[in-house]
Image (cartoon, helix red, strand yellow):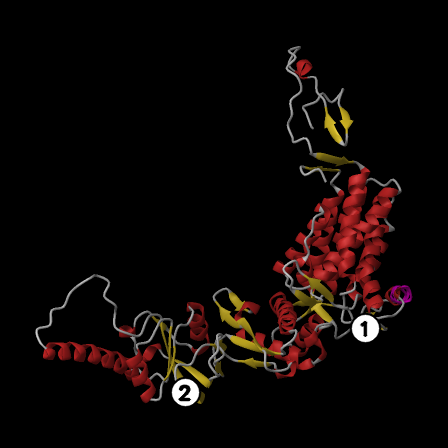
Amino acid sequence: MCEIYNPTRSKVHQGVLVRADWGEVMGGVDSGPVTIVRQETNITSGIEVTQKLIHAAKTLASILRGTLGPRGLDKGLYKSNGEFAVTSDGARILNDLLIKNPGAKLLVSLGKSQEEIIGDGVTSTVLLAGALLDEAGRLIRKGVHPLTVIDGYLRAADVAVSVLEKEAIECSIDDDEMLQHVASTSLGGRSAGSDTKFATMLVDALKQVTHETENGTRCDAEDILFDKLEDSTIGDTRLLSGMFWRKRIPMEQMTGIRKNVKVTLINCDIKQREIIRDLEIELQSAEDLAEFMQIQKQTNVDIAEKILATGADIICSSGDVERSILHQLAVANKVVIHDLDHKQLIHLAQASGATIVDHFNDLSDKDLGLVGHYEGERWAATDEVQDRVIFDECKGPIVTILVGGAMGAEETIRGMYDALRATSLAITDGSLLHGGGSSHMLAAKFVIMESEKVADRTRLGMEAFARALEMIPWMLAANCGVNPLDALLELRSVKSEGKNLIGVREDGSIGSVKNILEPAESLLHGIMAATETANSLLRCDQVISARGD
């Protein structure tokens, strides 16, 4: 139980500050103690809370250590709902863990921030934050004040960022080779990273969706769609300059391959308007009934002829299609695809250049789009929609990557999407840094050099920051199966000689990492975000738990 207390007479009971002589506070009127929190509330203070938070953060970071780099291993995630997944993606691992400790939760927030803003580098960022906290814990146990460590970290982070900004190399949309190296670096350790064709495919996809806008060049990974082909292998993965749909094809004659077809997009039902109000029609004779039915039939014929008059070869609708209209269009050798989502219409409009029309009465040949290749494949009827519709060879800024592989397709898609975001960031930001731990070692070298100019205890924090940076190449080497200490000592030696393009290669050897490239913004944001997260935990000297744990 926690009560209002007089600081000069307070005491600690079971970890909670208690007791206040309320009478003394109110000028002698004894009103008794006042409870302000629940009885089970627990407060942990002092060096103990800092060490607990650091230990929790280190434990979480240690889960991700084995996944870092091209030779990193996967984690098997067995969820509470019974699902089992195998992944090496740091963002997914953090998202699926049920974290309880507040210190570990802060590192989860760090990973989510890196994923949302950058799209890649989650594992290395979380590992750097864990290393910073580990080094800080050692200094605090030796009597260094946490604020002194924080000052050292802030100063070292500024040095590291400044050095890496100067070392960044320029990149543009025309540098195909450099962009492919960025994509390959991000794909390293994934199932799609073993074949260079995937990196080439990602760069081609990004170049197709890159276009000029009023605000400049737009290159967004969100314009690239993904879908799975369960009945194929990962080697069957391909790039479509258009869309892939799983929609029921109404009639057999609407399947097959067609070239250079015109598309119309209708955002309504293709049938007569339904009568909402109740009414009665009195028919005097059989001739009246026949005439009434003939009028309805002729109305459907007029609707079909209006659509045919536009010259469209493929009619896509978000609503239903009258059966008689469907047959008339089929007789004219047209393709009809209906019951589409509005987003599907928007994507096809972007790809083909068609204009979405809200009613078939407003159709004209000016609203048509062009598709270079249409392919419809009809499957046996099942509970699930298995028919496949492919629009390819479109000129608009929408593409789709069809990922093959019955097993692990989702993980392949996740890895390719992260690589897309990293590559698009390289295009928009226009600057790259070398990976393989090379940039981290370079930053650590200059932080150590700068720390030698500092005469107070802030130097200890800067040196600790440099050691934390060296943890990245250490783990890269360890995951490759080589001795990490030997690798780190060799890296320190070559960096002191000014060889800045040397790092940990895919096989664990120390050599040139000229072709291992990452977006500069990814590394810089990761260093600053990890520093801020570590400092936030180091500033915490008291944890108040309302649950008592």
Asked whether 285 or 44 is in front, the reply is 285
Asked whether 297 or 383 is in front, the reply is 383
Choose top left, top right, bottom left or bottom right for residue 485. bottom right
Picture coordinates of residue 396, whole percent (x, y): 47, 77
Question: Which residue is under mark 2?
Answer: 252
Q: Is mark 1 on a helix, strand or loop?
A: loop
Question: Which residue is under mark 1?
Answer: 505
Residue at image position (28%, 83%) is 309
Which residue, as the protein is rendered here, is positioned at the far top?
A: 28
Question: Tag 1: residue type?
Answer: Arg
Horizontally, is 259 left or right of 116 in the view?
left
Picture coordinates of residue 127, whole percent (x, y): 76, 58
Q: Residues under labels 1 and 2: Cα distance?
A: 54 Å
Question: Vertically, is 286 above or below 443?
Answer: below
Q: Does the magenta stretch include residue 486?
A: yes
Question: Tag 2: residue type?
Answer: Glu
Choose top left, top right, bottom left or bottom right for residue 148. top right
Magenta stretch in the rendered image: 485-493
Q: What element carries label 2?
A: helix
Q: Does the magenta stretch include residue 366?
A: no
Picture coordinates of residue 257, whole percent (x, y): 46, 89
* Quadrant into which the C terminus falls: top right
